[in-house]
Amino acid sequence: MKPVITISVVLPIHNEEKYIATALKSLIHQDFKEPFEILVVNNNSTDKTIEIVNAYQDKRIKIVEEKQQGVVFARQKGLHEAKGVLIAGADADSVYPSNWLTTITHHFKNHHVIGVGGPAIPERNPWWMYYWHLKSFGFVAWLYQKTGFVLYVIASNFAFRKSVFLSIGGYDTRFSMGGGDEIDPLARLRKKGKVVFDQHLQVNVSSRRYQVGFLKFLFIHSMYYYWFGYLASLLFKRRLIESSPVR
């Protein structure tokens, strides 16, 4: 009889040859002692990403394919393919501390907890984005400590109980990146049980998407693709704005 997989890490990829090796190394070398799997969801990569993944001779790594373009579709595919009781979202351009899975599962020992999130801090290049995230997640942590309310989570550092998330329909693919894999899941999960924000559950993320400059990031990436795209889809019940090509 095969051991029950405790947690499935869902890792969407689309042309991530520059980053995937570092992300996988950090996930492979977790200090977690229970069975877990790493589901690499290939979302139409055309570079050498899959070759790099295949070079890892680790039975915990499994590749699945999702032809519908978009990170929300990839996460949905991973959710349905996952064998784990818990789902942990990850990104190919992120680096995970060795105790990441251990810390996540510790929170779920409380049966009232259905979701756990933490900060994702980019490199110090550009410097303004590093401090933006540091202060933003600092506020999220402060608000949680004061009220128990989780204002925001990032998909690449958010875990939840698979059964609970499936019971509310999984990812809503009407929404694009941000709305579909962060804002909407958190809003629905908060209605079902306790969501925890652990300020010490920190991952490091590449600053590649922030090289466009502060104003362009704020108004194009954050406001247009993220918030306006989410609200427009919510209003019209379908996806109107596609995600930025860089995740």
Image (cartoon, rainbow, N blue to C red):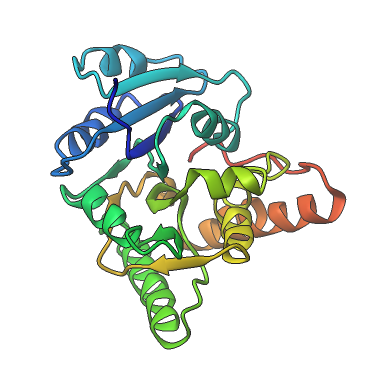
**Residue 95 or 8: which is nearer the viewer?**
8
Above or below 197: residue 145 = below
Q: Which quadrant of the structure image shows residue 222?
A: bottom right
Judge whether residue 143 can be spotted in this image.
yes
Q: Which quadrant of the structure image shows residue 32?
A: top left
Write the residue at 58% across / 41% down: 244
Q: Residue furthest bottom?
A: 146
Residue 101 x, y percent position in the rendering = 26, 48
Write the residue at 24% across / 34% down: 35
- Left or right: 147 as drawn, with respect to 91: right
Q: Which corner quadrant holds the N terminus?
A: top left
Q: Which quadrant of the structure image shows residue 69?
A: top right
Residue 233 x, y percent position in the rendering = 77, 50
**Residue 33 or 79: which is nearer the viewer?**
33
Q: Residue furthest front?
A: 1
Above or below 126: residue 87 = above
Q: How many marks?
A: 0
- Left or right: 193 as drawn, with respect to 54: right
- Left or right: 37 as drawn, with respect to 233: left
Write the residue at 20% across / 19% down: 58
Judge whether residue 19 can be spotted in this image.
no
Write the residue at 43% across / 46% down: 209
Residue 204 x, y percent position in the rendering = 27, 52
Residue 57 x, y percent position in the rendering = 18, 14
**Residue 231 or 112: which is nearer the viewer?**
112
Above or below 54: residue 23 = below
